[in-house]
Image (tube, grey):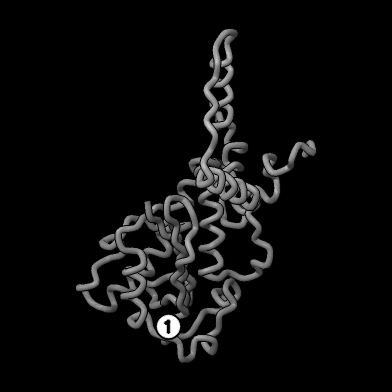
Amino acid sequence: MRQVILDTETTGLDPGQGHRIIEIGCVELRNRRRTDRVFQHYVNPERDIEAGAFNVHGISLQDLAGKPRFADIVQGLLDFVRDAEVIIHNAAFDVEFINAELKLLGPEWGQFADHCTVLDSLVLARQRHPGQKNSLDALCARYFVDNSGRDVHGALRDAQLLADVYLAMTGGQAALLLEGVESTATATAARVARSTQPGRRLRVISPSAEELAAHQHRLADIERLSGGRCIWLRDGDGE
């Protein structure tokens, strides 16, 4: 399963008023694990940046001098997301901007949804946490994702944070604790209890080296996503 987490920064809020993308950042997930593959570019919008937008991302027109235009990076972007599930927080905003950029390039580029599928993580968060704040910062706090240093927004940095939030929200240790659902460990314990009736012998199967390595990798993921609260790494110290 291949997924891409995507975020953009822009010159303003409305592509209908001629606002453009100035940064796009993507990170790749394969089988719910972050890979080393990223796609990130600053983009020269060939227009001014509104003061309100600058206050959010801190990117000035001077910073973008000499950067490629969207036309120069579009093929790389579409190749990166092709046939993936693309996860975006408040997807309508980013997709509208990408579609506006594609439209400027000509009808042969189609729309973003012609190249991938889109999942809105904001809609997902609202379903899981109705009536609560579901901004990226709020979700980072809820799922113990370290967003220290996020004084301003950045597309690649925010995509990396959203990747950690999405993984926690859809299957990490924090999600299990906060949602109050029965964990796999609880279900396993119930099965073991039923299997240990008097007179029954349990068959012991030792894990392979590959399985042990995968287990340690998973514990490391839980430790990171839970902010250092993975109890299976505490060696019985009571924490």
Closer to the camera in the image, 38 or 156: 38
Q: Residue 142: percent from the left, percent from the top? A: 63, 47
For label 1, the crowd category at 10 Å Cα-Cα, with few meaning under 14, some 14 to 19 and many 20 or more, is: many
Asked whether, in this view, residue 158 is left or right of residue 44, the answer is right
Asked whether, in this view, residue 109 is left or right of residue 23, the answer is left
Q: Residue at 23% x, 77% y: name it.
A: 106
Q: Residue at 42% x, 70% y: name it.
A: 14
| Kind of residue at disc 1 | Pro
Q: Which residue in the structure is indicated by mark 1? A: 45
**Up/down of 46 relative to 176, above or below:** below
Q: In which quarter of the image is the C terminus?
A: top right
Residue 142, visible in the rendered structure: no
Q: Residue 137: percent from the left, percent from the top? A: 61, 57
In the displayed orientation, state which residue is furthest to the left.
108
In the displayed orientation, state which residue is furthest to the right.
237
Q: Residue at 56% x, 21% y: name it.
A: 192
Q: Residue 18: percent from the left, percent from the top? A: 38, 78
Total labels drawn? 1
Element under disc 1: loop
Residue 42, visible in the rendered structure: yes
Q: In which quarter of the image is residue 177?
A: top right
**Up/down of 220 relative to 171, above or below:** below
Asked whether, in this view, residue 24 is left or right of residue 51, the answer is left
Closer to the camera in the image, 29 or 170: 29
